[in-house]
Image (cartoon, rainbow, N blue to C red):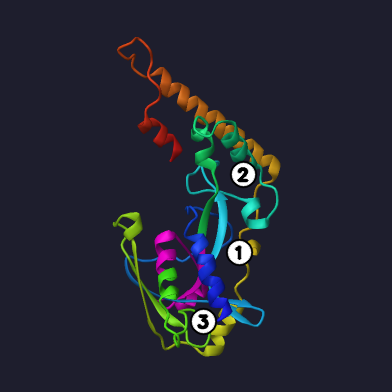
Amino acid sequence: MDSNLKNTLARLEQLNQRTSGKGGAGAVKYFKPKQGKNNLVALPRIVDGGYSDPIYEWGVHKNLLDQPFMTVDCDAFNHRTDCVICDCVKDLKQANFKDNMFLWKPMELQVQYFSPIIDLDNITEGVQWWRYGKSVLSQFSTWLTNLEEEETPYYDINNPEKIIVAFDKNAPAMEMYKLEHKALKLPFSKQQFEDYAASVKPLGEILRQRHSQEEQSTLVTKLMSRLKEEIDNAMSQADIDASGSKPGISREKLDKLKN
């Protein structure tokens, strides 16, 4: 097993222990799977001395903008710089982890996973980014873990494999994607495949930061005010219990606010 593959497996083990999420933004051409079978080829990451896996990760914070699918990039995760939102989450946890959960949980760091791909059913679209969750990540990890001594990974630059994605939008989230990988005869030249791979830019250049630290602070303040107001409203509408006191907010209501 070469060193790049060992590094990939070690990194995948760490990624599988993190919390994933949906969302994201930026001028990115995203791959949208169609219902049923999709045929893809993943583009390896070009690195000094060769190539590596095509699995990229990107940190975001949810629930801070008007629409649930919109996110704010995490400066700490993506750029290794200070993140106002992460600092706020940390402070709330340290102040009172349990009682403040309804405040910090909705905006806690979530990690998205991406791979640059070519849709073999629609090659003219060129390079696209496939954003997926932990169920797909886990399947990729299993493929790599189970490689035999003489086998190459599905993203091998000299012998890439076809990824067959069976997509069912009506299935539960963890069962929407069923993956297979098979030998592939490229429908374009090997040089074209290498050119596609070489054209992939780092995510940091594509998903550019859209919110300054001042804007992030404002978003956090608005979210906390909204959540506190919803908690107060829920409490004011609660029924009086047998002892004449208002019960604490129900787990159902708290869970609704956390999601």
Q: Is residue 44 visible?
A: no
Amino acid on which the number 3 mark rests in the picture: Met
Residue 30, relative to residue 60: is it above or below? below
The location of residue 247, given as percent across then percent down, is: 37, 19
In the picture, residue 84 is in which quadrant? top right
The location of residue 127, given as percent across then percent down, is: 53, 73
Q: Residues within 10 Å of mark 3 (few under 14, many from 20)?
A: few
The answer to the question of whether label 1 and label 2 lie on touching residues, with beta carbons closer than 8 A, is: no
C-alpha gap between disc 1 and disc 3: 27 Å
Nearest to N terminus: mark 2 or mark 3: 3
Question: Closer to the observer: label 2 or label 3?
Answer: 3
Residue located 48% across and 49% down the image: 69
The residue that disc 1 covers is 203
Amino acid on which the number 2 mark rests in the picture: Cys
The residue that disc 3 covers is 1
Nearest to N terminus: mark 1 or mark 3: 3
Q: Is residue 38 left or right of residue 72?
A: left
Residue 80, relative to residue 136: is it above or below? above
The residue that disc 2 covers is 86
